[in-house]
Amino acid sequence: MSGSSFPENPAIPAPAESRRLPRRWRRDWGEKDRRLLEGPRSRWAEFKTLLHIGWELLQGFRELHFIGPCVTVFGSARFPPGHPYYELGLQVGAEIARLGFNVMTGGGPGIMEAANRGGQEAGGHSIGCNIILPKEQSANKYIDRLISFHYFFVRKVMLVKYSQAFVILPGGYGTLDEAFEAATLVQTGKMHEFPIIFMGIQYWQPLFDFIRDGMAPAKTIDPDDIERFLLTDSIEELRVGLQQTPFKLFADKPLPQRRWWLGE
């Protein structure tokens, strides 16, 4: 990482998985989560679900174990190339890569594509954790390592577990879900105080007004909780924010070594 003591990223092998989803996954896009959430089923059905969840977790851990420090970018799949927020995503991805981080996203189109593309074009490593959906599920083409998941919650574990900061660009329900899960984990001490940076002042200002003028006065959050977020349009402020990542917590911890006898 230029001009810093952050660890360098290890080389990432070529993707182990084709961007073309297996036919059975395309056919079964929504059944896994739906079956899990539809209430009690037979013990055998529940046991098979547990095995599948465990397999997806294992797959994610194995694929991402050696990638090094990441910054995860959240944002909508619905902004096309040329849209101002897509262009902002390009800048964000490039800046993350220039700081020496891997760029991690949900792997889809829109802002996720923009961040992956910006990181890749800036010479960084680009990672996508894709979710299988009836629409908007196609992985973008600017990904060095792609992993696809059936379960939203497994995917979110991966996006959080391997990240040292989070950048929130304009998005919908999914973006809010991901952003506030990260905020809750920091608030409750389940995760280190990694930077959580919202970009797009015009889009996010009403949300921040509600947090400041609605939630804080109602005492559903503490005043200090507002300070957990940075809201900006500035790439320079993004850079400064990302440099607050507490790498000192990990600086003396060696990166994992591959073990041939584990098939790594």
Image: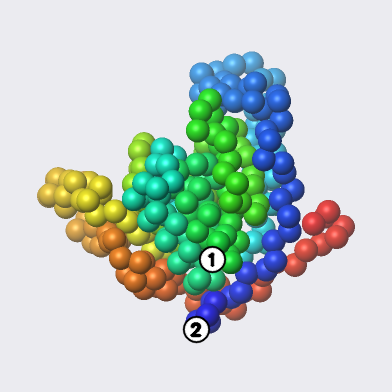
In the picture of the structure, the residue carrying the numbered disc 2 is 3
Crowdedness of circle 1 by 10 Å Cα count: few (<14), some, many (20+)? some
Mark 1 secondary-structure assignment: loop
Q: Determine which quarter of the picture holds residue 123.
A: bottom right
Q: CA distance from mark 1 to mark 2?
A: 17 Å
The circle on residue 204 is none
Q: Tell me which amino acid carries mark 1.
A: Ala
In the picture of the structure, the residue carrying the numbered disc 1 is 122
Q: Tell me which amino acid carries mark 2.
A: Gly
Say whether marks 1 and 2 touch (CB < 8 Å): no
Find residue 227 and report its horizontal and vertical position in percent.
25, 62
Mark 2 secondary-structure assignment: loop
Find residue 62 and report its horizontal and vertical position in percent.
70, 52
Q: Residue at x 50, y 48 (%)?
A: 113
- For the C terminus, the image quarter is bottom right
Q: Residue at x 42, y 42 (%)?
A: 80
